[in-house]
Image (spheres, grey):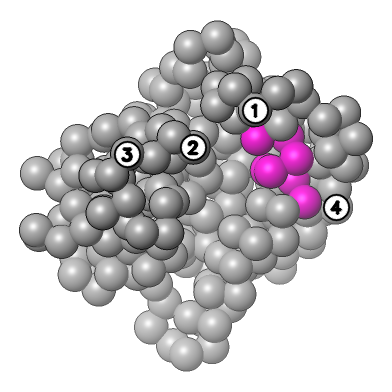
């Protein structure tokens, strides 16, 4: 069985979990305190980051590399497009969410509201929370624009770009920080992703001290 060292509200870990679920890979989830790393943890990944996937006897790190490896190893169902142009757009959007969206939104909301308390790093920074709450509007509008031109974020087929975006938004939805009324198009897109079997383990997550809102696990939210 595969083994994933993860943090429940890490969008990078969630992206790998979604990919594993879509590929129907049975996986054992092990929570890792990356902010207080053990020697074993640092041996698994000297970068000191999650996710770390143990698969086929090898420890793998970096979520995008892991997901693309899984797609090449288990080609059905495909999550990486065949054409160079479509692969470019998928990777561009994966980077958009894992870099720009993460820096401007996820880190300012999830990490300030949840991670700081769990890791004992002090109180939330209200300025960063305000920044995250403002910037998410821009990103939701951008997603609305993309989805107005195509069925899925990177094109007319679901790809890793959709799982990457959904991983980030699911973390924010857990803490009730997404205004789903801002875009019915984005709402419908997320409802489609949320209804996939791969999403079930994410909807079952429970972080002690941080109960999710009632709509979090509701497929008809």
Real-space Cα separation, disc 1 to disc 4, in angstroms: 29 Å
Residue 89 among those drawn in magenta: no
Instruction: Give yes or no for contact between labels 3 and 2 (Cβ–Cβ under 8 Å).
Output: no
Which residue is denoted by mark 1 in the rendering? 121
Rendered image quadrant of residue 57: bottom left
In the depicted view, which residue is nearer to us: 177 or 215? 177
Which residue is denoted by mark 4 in the rendering? 138
> Which of labels 2 and 4 is toward the front?
2
Instruction: Give yes or no for contact between labels 1 and 4 (Cβ–Cβ under 8 Å).
Output: no
Q: From what the image shows, is residue 66 above or below residue 84?
A: above
Q: Which residues are magenta?
A: 104-111
Residue 125 appears at what percent x and percent y?
82, 30
Q: From what the image shows, is residue 141 above or below residue 85?
A: above
Which residue is denoted by mark 3 in the rendering? 38
Instruction: Give yes or no for contact between labels 2 and 1 (Cβ–Cβ under 8 Å).
Output: yes
Name the residue located 65 percent from the left edge and 62 percent from the top edge.
99
């Amino acid at each position: 069985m595969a083994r994933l060292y993860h943090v429940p509200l890490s969008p990078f870990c969630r992206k790998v979990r979604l990919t594993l679920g879509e590929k129907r890979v049975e996986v054992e989830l092990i929570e890792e305190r990356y902010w207080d790393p053990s020697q074993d943890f640092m041996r698994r990944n000297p970068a000191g980051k999650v996710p770390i996937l143990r698969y086929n006897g090898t420890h793998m790190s970096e979520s995008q590399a892991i997901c693309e490896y899984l797609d090449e190893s288990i080609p059905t169902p495909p999550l990486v497009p065949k054409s160079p142009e479509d692969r470019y757009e998928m990777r561009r959007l994966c980077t958009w969410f894992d870099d720009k969206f993460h820096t401007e939104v996820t880190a300012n909301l999830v990490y300030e509201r949840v991670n700081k308390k769990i890791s004992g790093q002090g109180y939330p920074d209200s300025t960063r929370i305000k920044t995250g709450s403002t910037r998410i509007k821009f990103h939701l509008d951008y997603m609305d624009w993309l989805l107005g031109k195509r069925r899925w974020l990177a094109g007319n087929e679901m790809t890793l770009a959709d799982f990457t975006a959904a991983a980030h938004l699911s973390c924010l939805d857990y803490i009730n920080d997404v205004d789903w009324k801002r875009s019915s198009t984005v709402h419908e897109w997320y409802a489609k992703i949320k209804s996939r079997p791969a999403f079930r383990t994410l909807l079952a997550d429970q972080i002690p001290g941080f109960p999710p809102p009632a709509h979090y696990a509701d497929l008809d939210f």
